[in-house]
Image: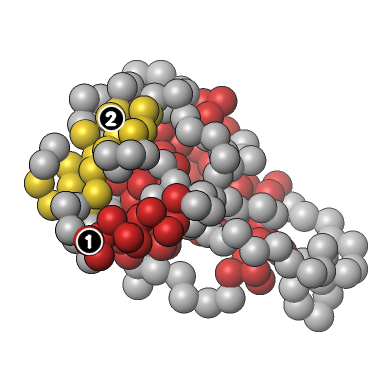
Amino acid sequence: MSRFRGPRLKVTRRLGDLPGLTRKTARRAYPPGQHGQGRRKRSEYAVRLEEKQKLRFNYGVTERQLIRYVKKARRVQGSTGQVILQLLEMRLDNTVFRLGMAPTIPAARQLVNHGHVTINGKVLDIPSYQIRPGDVIAVRDRDASKKLVEANLEYPGLANLPNHLEFDKAKLTAKVNGTIEREWVALNINELLVVEYYSRKV
């Protein structure tokens, strides 16, 4: 199952703020469940698992997909943790979200799935597509697509546009100028713990 369909606020109460998953804020600050308000002594494994779960739920990927990204990141030169974040950030659904075309990553995935987005002039309905420097992302040239995106742009999920993207709101087109840098990743996460989690498993 590729998508999480359960209560999103329950996840954010347990894992903290996940800007890609939901814009809502929970009324209760403590974790969900019968012992949510009790003190928890977390093991090292639990801490690493939690960081990994942040990635899964924020970017809306399955465990299998995440393992694939980890394996791919290991083959690339540089910090494995940062490469994993870059691969996830450079997904088409996340990029549509970062441009403000959709309020959350699940909403951006739906936008892509329904054929509202084009890459280099062609309709692409694959949310996991890895965008590359030089790609041009645009809203499909039809009224329904434009109205939907224009409505979303009035209330973007995140205020700041990453420096690797440039966006023309009048034409509803964006250009990818490079790869996202670590400081522009909106998710509060320690990626080294994710790498440590998978070092024993993959």
Residue sitting nearer the eye, 196 or 136: 136
Quadrant hosting residue 176? top left
**Badge 1 amino acid:** Asp
Residue on which disc 1 sits = 143
Identify the residue at horizontal 39%, vertical 25% (top origin). Answer: 164
Q: Residues within 10 Å of mark 1 (few under 14, many from 20)?
A: few
Q: Which mark is residue 175?
A: 2
Seen as rendered, the residue at the extreme top is 78
Identify the residue at horizontal 44%, vertical 56% (top origin). Answer: 152
Q: Residues within 10 Å of mark 2 (few under 14, many from 20)?
A: some
Of marks 2 and 1, the one in the foreground: 1
Quadrant hosting residue 110? bottom left
Identify the residue at horizontal 48%, vertical 33% (top origin). Answer: 161
Dot 2: element: strand
Q: Is residue 23 left or right of residue 84?
A: right
Percent position of residue 2, x then y: 35, 67
**Badge 2 amino acid:** Lys
